[in-house]
Image: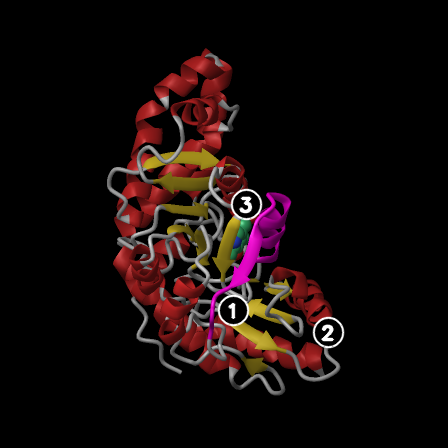
Amino acid sequence: MTPAADRTLAENWRAARPPVAGVHFDSAACSRQSFAVIDAAAQHARHEAEVGGYVAAEAAAPALDAGHAAVRALTGMRDADVVLTTGANHALDILLGEWTGERTLACLPGEFGPSLMSMQRHGFEIRELPVDGFGRLDLDAVGAFLSSNPPALVHFTVLASHTGIVQPAREMASACRAHDITLIVDAAQGFAHLDCTGIGADVLYTTSRKWTAGPRGVGMLATRPGWFSQATMERLSHAEKNIGLHVALSVALGEHVAAGPQEIQARLREVGAVTRGALGQATGWRVVEPDDEPSAITTLQPPDGVDPMEVRARLIAEHSIVTTFLGLERAPREMTRPALRVSPHVDVTDADLETLVEALAAVTR
Ligand SMILES: *Cc1c(COP(=O)(O)O)cnc(C)c1O
């Protein structure tokens, strides 16, 4: 196994962070923040104590503007309005709550469970987009699907939480445009991981803590200008927020842009391939994605009789390896059995992967 690693990118990424206690394979849930990101949040809190929270907020305005500009650049939504929320689900909740059209939407069968719950809570009728055996949008069938019974909007998750299958977002956007259907993109797993520029969505939202490696409890919502009413924009911008975390997210976005979004994307594709190659040797476990699927999320289905929830717990307790347990509630319309998710970031090493393969064998025995 010889990953043609971009040493500089990986080494810089690792050196910018506190040393990891064990092995971290949980970037799709929560990446490791850098020293600069951690310090930015602490420094802002200190400044609030020194000069007052509202004066400190004014002083932070240029840093926050830079973060908004980075969101526009990384989505290619050049004149988007950007609102920071407390997470991706919060962004969806705002969007669906404010929707004034007919409450019908189409999404993939692999839609994220909490998002489905939000859609139901807001009274939306949910239809399932056509897919292939991997749960990937069926491009041959989508046109007919949208013509025969057009939903008011499509909610499209570019990369799911329970599988590393990359969805054709640009093609979805063209189909929506052709049928005059509003497109909302969930990029919680795609942002700062896949190329999310120029998808052509009306709205894109994402989260800070995953591949962006920003703080927890922050989400980003980018909308076509004029999407929300003036009154809604004012209400959203005056809502109480943790400015220190927003400043920290701006720093994380700045680091991402400085490292090179395309370099990071290329490295993460390579990370996915190397990870699947290594885990293909973990006896009894089945890698769900094709080896060369262009994402860094790898999903493993356990051998019969093995409980991935227990395996996750034992990997932490006995081997200091952090992975994710995937229960069926994560994608209730698609998952048929629980799984284990392995999501390293750019700094993964062959040794990390060997450690995981050995530990998996030990806890599966
Ligand atoms: C994590 C995730 C979300 C929710 O993000 P939060 O910031 O926790 O609200 C939404 N959609 C997908 C696909 C996710 O993976």
| Of pointers 2 and 3, the one earlier in the residue sequence | 3
Point 35% across, 76% down: residue? 3
In the picture as drawn, the residue positioned furthest to the front comes out as: 148
Q: Tell me the SS state at disc 3.
A: helix
Q: Position of residue 339 (x, y in %)?
A: 63, 72
| Of pointers 1 and 2, the one earlier in the residue sequence | 1
Quarter of the N terminus within the rendering: bottom left
Q: Quadrant of residue 248?
A: top left
Residue 327 visible in the picture: no
In the picture as drawn, the residue positioned furthest to the left comes out as: 78
Where 240 falls versus 292 (above or below)? above
Residue holding disc 2: 307
Point 35% across, 57% down: residue? 176
Q: CA distance from mark 2 to mark 3?
A: 28 Å
Residue span colored magenta: 112-131
Where 117 falls versus 283 (above or below)? above
Residue holding disc 3: 89
Magenta run includes residue 121: yes
Name the mark on residue 163.
Answer: 1
Point 63% across, 45% down: residue? 121
Q: Label 2 crowding class (10 Å Cα cut-off): few <14, some 14-19, many 20+? A: some
Magenta run includes residue 308: no
Where 312 falls versus 226 (above or below)? below
Q: Tell me the SS state at disc 1.
A: loop
Q: CA distance from mark 3 to mark 1?
A: 19 Å
Residue type at the position of mark 3:
Asn
Q: Is residue 333 left or right of residue 83?
A: right
Q: Quadrant of residue 5?
A: bottom left
Q: Tell me the SS state at disc 2.
A: loop
Q: Position of residue 105 (x, y in %)?
A: 50, 54
Colour setup of the view: secondary structure
Q: Is the residue indicated by label 3 positioned so its CB lies within 8 Å of ligand 1?
A: yes
